[in-house]
Structure formats: C-alpha cells, structure tokens
Amino acid sequence: MLYKTKDLIEKSYDVIVVGGGLGGLTLANKMAKDGRSVLLLEAHNKLGGFATWFRRMSKNAHDEAHFFDVSLHGFPVGMIKTCRKYWSKEIADRIHQLKSVRYINPQFNVETDFTKEDFTKVLIEKFGVEKSTVDAFFTELQNMNFYDNSSMTNGELFQKFFPNRNDITRFLLEPIVYANGSNLEDPAISYGIVFSNFMSKGVYIFQGGTDTMINMMKEELLKNGVDIKLQSKVDRILVETVQVNGKETPRVFGVEVKGQKIFSKAVVSNANIKSTVQKMIGEEYFSADFVQKTKEVRLNTSSCQVYMGLKKDESLPFIGDLIFTSIDQDFSTDLILSPEVGSQTYSVYYPETRPHLKDHYAIVSSSNARYEDWKKLSPEDYEKQKAYVIERALIGLEKIVPDIRNKIDHIEAATPLTVERYTHHPMGTSFGTKFEGLPISMNLHKEIDGAFHAGSVGIIMSGWLGAANYGVIQAHEVDNYLTKLEKEELIKISDKKCIEGESHV
C-alpha cells in the first residue's frame, strides 16, 4: 500500500529499504516477489533518486507543461534483460535504442551508433589505428573481470594501446566521464566494464520518459505487495547488541523516522555509503578498521544541468540524440570539472521520447562539476555562475541550431547544490563514490547483522543499469541473511520443545 505522509506504520517487516533510487527500488521489488514483506521509505515526494524528472508550466501556452529528465539519458542494452527479469515485460518493452551519438570538438567531428562494430570502423578509418590494435583493445576490455586485482589505471590502459593519442582518449573516455565520473587515475576496470556494456549493442532510452518508467515501477511495487511511504527521511538505522554464539554482536532492528520507530529484521540503505555508516548508523557500532576505511572513501564528482523546453509550435530537426561538445583544444578530465569548462553534453528529447505528449521537445545540457567550486560562492556569485552556465549552453547549442534562442519557452539550471538539496547526497555527488567505496558497501552486513547497502558505489555500480543490478546482488545477500535467521529461530523452537518434553518425563 501507499502510505499517506501522516500515517503511522504499526506493522513490522522482513526488510526496510531506505531510499527509492533504482538500486533500492529493484531490491524491494525482487524481495517482494520472493515473498518477503518490504517497506520502502523515500525522503522525496517521488521515487527514482537521481533517475527522476520534473515539470514546468509553459509561459506561452495555456495548460501546456515541459517535462525534463534529470539524469543524462542513455543506458546499455542490458537494462532490457534486467527490467524483464526483475520488473515486468511491459517496462522492458519500452526500452528503445538511440539512433545517433555525436562528438563535436576541435580534435574531431564524429557520429556513431555507439556499437563495437561502428567504433572499430571509426578508430580505423578516422583515427588511423591498425585493426589488430583495435581488436586487442576490445579483447582487453571484454576480459576485464570485476574480481581481478589489477592496478592498471584508465590512463595506463589508453597509453598501452594508443600511446600519446589524446584525441582517441577523448573519443573513448569522454562518454564514460559523463556516465559515471571516471577519470584517468581511476582503475581501468571502472572504465572497461561500463564501456563494454554500452558497446555491446549501443545506447538505449526509456520511451515515455523517466516519469512514465518510475510510475510504472511504483505500480509494480504496489502490485507485488511493497509498502511505500514518501516524504519519510530516515533519521537513524536502529542497532542493538545481541548474543550470537556467546559473542556480543551488533544487529539492526529497524529505523526511526520523525521520532517513530519502525521495526524490521533487516535494513537496506540506498543512501550514500558514507552517510549510511557515519550518520544513519553511527561509527561506534563498527570496527576501527572499517571506520577508517570508510573515512578514506572518496566521493565522486557532481554535475550541472541546463533544462530547455521549446515553445508549443516550435520543433527541431534531428541533430542527434546525445551530442558531446567541447571548445577545449585537448581532452582533460580535470578540465571537464572546471567552472570554466568548455565541455558539455546535450541530451535531445524528441516527440517520440514522450509520444503521449503532443510535439514535446526538450534539451538538457549536462556538464561535470566540483561541489566545492559552487559551495564557496556568495549568493550573488552563485546566480552569476548559473547564468554563465545557461549562456554557455545556449552558445554551444547555437552552433548546431542557430535560431535556438527564439525556439525556447523555458530555461533553468541545476547545480551540485541542487543535487545535494533533492537527493541528500553528500557534496551533491551524482555518481556515488570512487572505487574503494564498493568493498565498504558489500561488507556492511559483515560488521552489523542485518545492515545492507545498495547505493551507488565504486563507479561500475553507477548509472541506471549498474544501480539496478547492484540492487539485485544485494537482494540475494539480504535473502540469505533472512533465511539464516529463520533457521536459527526453528532451531530455538526445536530446542525449546525438546527441553519442555524432557521436563514432563
């Protein structure tokens, strides 16, 4: 059922999921379908986490609205399989392939369908790379394993196959920088797995928009018996100390929301891992080594967006679905994060993206950003910087659509502070944590019985597909824990019956 904001929850659950991002949603749905009782608590007034949307009313047309998707659109073909298996055929059937991904920068101008075959062709014909080298590069990516203990960085990977070719590094890495915040110093596996996922069959999008997808997911959750309560920010994950095999062990027993305690056997946090450990649970329940390692986890970067909605009677020619643009002469992941960044990506939403809305066009410009560059600004400078980001988006777009300013009905910008406000992600991170966050997340339940995490960690668990699949991975861990508790309870009951039987003899 969908609880109202003022409703008190008086029942207990097998598992409480804290946060309604794609990881938490997928975990909740799988566990409910497997017969577990699930409560999903979300601080915002809608589900989705960073995979969300908003609307703005048109200035020039009565009762017309602009719909904007917050996340950079595009995910791998694997999302179809994940949605079909863990959500529904109806959701999976709405995932369609994008036609065109474009690069426009001083080093090259390329259009691709983002498949391995097309990338191979471009690398050979446009960049002059030998086919044997291209094949070896893709073989290296395909053989990368999540469990490999390789110290190779992204920079070393590109230097190995394409030495001193900054243009090729730009071609291969730039989309992944926008997808999960990778840089040249990050482990090559963080690039290889994500890039290989995209390269299998191109880039895909959900037809109907993020609003349609999340609403379909909400209905699926409710149909499968998940209880949902929105506008319910969890203040604490409740922990008690119990005796397990003669040893004092911390164990979760629920959460606290606005002073109300809600009880459960397990709790899964879909929030940031550092917030989960340091704020919602508390460092006092963890080993000193685990706390130290958590403190050392680096948060990933944030982003800015400029949302542009076209006037009711205006249209766009097909200019591509994703357009990676830059005025920077050379590629640098550090430059991409600069406040004066010359790089941005345009996501173009044509009427077929939301066919239920008549002739609906929208464009979203995305650029990576550092939270600290925005946090330090005075209110006046903050507004000036937002205006600069908007103007930069328009100037870049004018090179593709010269009369774009006359077509726009609504325009606004979001910053890392906007991300922080609506998602509660520390430092407004759009991509969770760096790679070292993954073992902290996966080992949380080894520190505290019943405590699990399914948020965005380790870069490869970022993005829509990574988030959903990580929810599935953690759902198995939670189910194993609950099964173990049930077996322990059966043993206790059996032992009690035996003792009572002996006492009557």
Image (cartoon, rainbow, N blue to C red):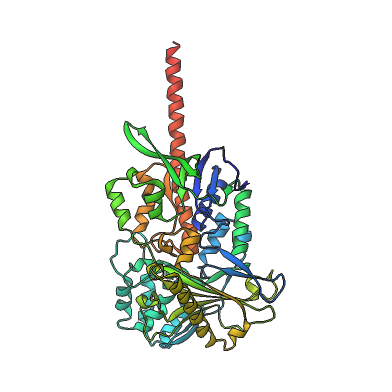
Instruction: Identify the residue at the far right of this view.
Output: 62
Considering depth in this image, is 375 or 49 the residue closer to the camera?
375
Instruction: Identify the residue at the far top of this view.
Output: 505
Considering depth in this image, is 201 or 346 the residue closer to the camera?
346
Indicate the position of residue 178 as horizontal and vertical percent values: 44, 72
Indicate the position of residue 86 as horizontal and vertical percent values: 55, 55
In this rendering, the answer to whether 487 lies above or below 454 is above
Q: How many marks?
A: 0
In this rendering, the answer to whether 324 lies above or below 420 is below
Does residue 426 appear to the left or right of 263 in the view shown? Answer: left
**Residue 316 seen anywhere in this rendered image of the structure:** no
**Residue 90 seen anywhere in this rendered image of the structure:** yes
Residue 225 sits in which quadrant? Answer: top right
Considering depth in this image, is 322 or 143 the residue closer to the camera?
322
In this rendering, the answer to whether 323 lies above or below 22 is below
Residue at x 37% of width, y 43% of height = 448
Indicate the position of residue 285 as horizontal and vertical percent values: 34, 43
Indicate the position of residue 100 as horizontal and vertical percent values: 54, 79
Q: Quadrant of the C terminus?
A: top left
